[in-house]
Every structure is written in C-alpha cells, then in structure tokens.
Amino acid sequence: MLNRRTVKIFTGLWVAYALLSLPAWVGPAFLQEISSHIYLTPIWAVYIFHYLGVPGLLEHGGACGWSLCSPTATGWALLIVFWAGVAWCVAGGLACLTLGSRARADIAPPRAGR
C-alpha cells in the first residue's frame, strides 16, 4: 500500500485541509466561520474518545467546570496518529480506485483453480 500514488494523495489531503482551514486564522471575516468548522472538527475527536472512556486525553480528567478542557500531550498525539491513519486509509483507497483496469488486474489476488 506504500506507493507513490498513495503518498501523493496523502500529501494532497493534508495540503487541502491546511488551505481550507487557513482562512480561520488569516482570512476575511466572511470565511472565518466555515473555515473554523473545518479546522475544529478533527479536534473534537479527542472529546469523543474521552466520552468513550479513553483516559488521559484531557487535562484535569475532563473536569474543567463550564469550559472545555484542552487536550494533554497524549491527547494531541492520539489525534495526530488517528487522523493521519484515517487520511492514509482514504489515500490508499483513492489510489486503488484511480488505478487503471490493467493495473488492478496485476494486484488482484489469484483466484482458486487457476
């Protein structure tokens, strides 16, 4: 699954995410709201993992009163590994889907009886 096509698509996904979330920081005011949603959506995953019972992801064990606790270093590491894995799987799937039919026949598993 590690080939040039997968790496190019993986890089393209990360660059697209960075460009789409960039207006949240430096863009015009009318783009900041939608861009903020694009930027924050992956970060919410740490709160979902905390809700599902994964310990050590949020500061103070998730008990920060009325505000949201920020992720710990473990939480940030989990987010990066999780979303990099999701992006890699999507890139691998897209790379496989964009292969020509001749190339697909070369990587297909052999059939029984042949």
Image (cartoon, rainbow, N blue to C red):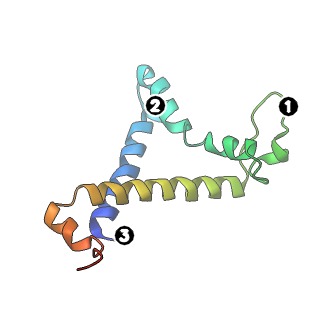
Picture coordinates of residue 41, whole percent (x, y) = 55, 37
The residue labelled by disc 2 is 35
Asked if residue 64 lies left or right of residue 76, the reply is: right
State yes or no: discs 3 and 1 in contact (Cβ < 8 Å): no
Between discs 1 and 2, the one toward the N terminus:
2
The residue labelled by disc 3 is 1
Three-letter amino acid code at the position of disc 1: Gly
Residue at figure coordinates x 42%, y 19% from the top left: 30
Three-letter amino acid code at the position of disc 3: Met
Which quadrant is the C terminus positioned in? bottom left
- Please determine whether, in this image, residue 6 is positioned above or below residue 38: below
Name the image quarter holding residue 68: top right
Between discs 3 and 2, the one toward the N terminus:
3
Which residue ends up furthest to the top in the rendered image? Answer: 30
Three-letter amino acid code at the position of disc 2: Ser
- Which of discs 3 and 1 lies nearer the camera? The answer is 3
Dot label at residue 83: none
Picture coordinates of residue 107, whole percent (x, y) = 26, 72
Dot label at residue 65: 1
Q: In whole angstroms, how far apart are the C-alphas of marks 1 and 2?
A: 28 Å
Secondary element at tag 1:
loop
Which residue ends up furthest to the front in the rendered image? Answer: 113
Residue at figure coordinates x 40%, y 53% from the top left: 90
Q: Viewer-proximal residue, 50 or 8? A: 50
